[in-house]
Image: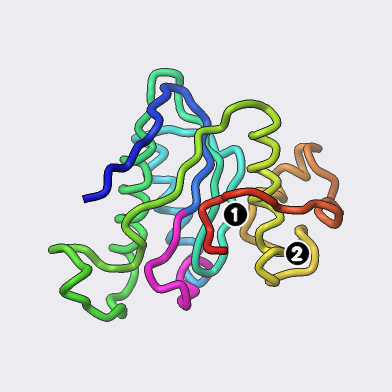
Amino acid sequence: MPNYRRAFVPGGCWFFTVNLRDRRKTLLVDHIETLREAISVTRQSYPFAIDAFVVLPDHLHAVWSLPPDDFDFSTRWRLIKSRFAKALPKEEPFDAVRLRPNERGVWQRRFWEHLIRDEADFARHVEYCYINPMKHGLVSRVSDWRYSSFHRDVRAGLFPQDWGGDVEATGNFGERG
């Protein structure tokens, strides 16, 4: 059994990559309101700040900050993934080898997380979230992707509307190469 090592830092800030089990599906954008509801309901019981968020058809990236006395991002992801999966129609094939009892098989079981170390690391991961739809060829401009907190950050004056033309996403962000 793998030995997963996670940093547990109360009040920490993390970058996440979370994938659908079947990367050919487009469930996340097809059911964006269901995903938003799962996140909203989870935040009511387990608060966290969304510093950046981008939803692509088959995966998502997020940067979260947790409350000062809390480090439990795993429970939050478990609840979001479970709530989203339970709200979907049962269309995925059943795979007795990979599925546990009561598991839907919508999501990959685990997720990638990275503890943000400093302001430069934070900026690099937020920028990666926002540039990701361009990286995957879904849009030619960051501002054209609807499912991103980039638009919130533009309204707040943190990014110009035309940002992203000269940004290169390099590094390990939990995605396949």
Check disc 2 and report the residue beneath it.
144
State the residue at coordinates (70%, 46%).
Answer: 127
Q: Which mark is residue 157?
A: none
Furthest-left residue in view?
101
Residue at the spot 37% in from the left edge and 68% down from the top edge: 21
Q: What's the amino acid at mark 2?
A: Asp
Q: Position of residue 156 (x, y in %)?
A: 76, 37
**48 relative to 68, above or below:** below
Disc 2/disc 1 C-alpha distance (Å): 12 Å
Please provide percent x and percent y for residue 148.
Answer: 64, 54
State which tag comes first along the sequence, 2 or 1: 1
Image position, residue 109 (x, y; %): 31, 57
Give neighbour class at mark 2: few <14, some 14-19, many 20+ (Cα, 10 Å).
some
Q: Which residues are magenta?
A: 18-29
For mark 1, what is the residue? Answer: 54
- Viewer-proximal residue among 31 and 120: 120
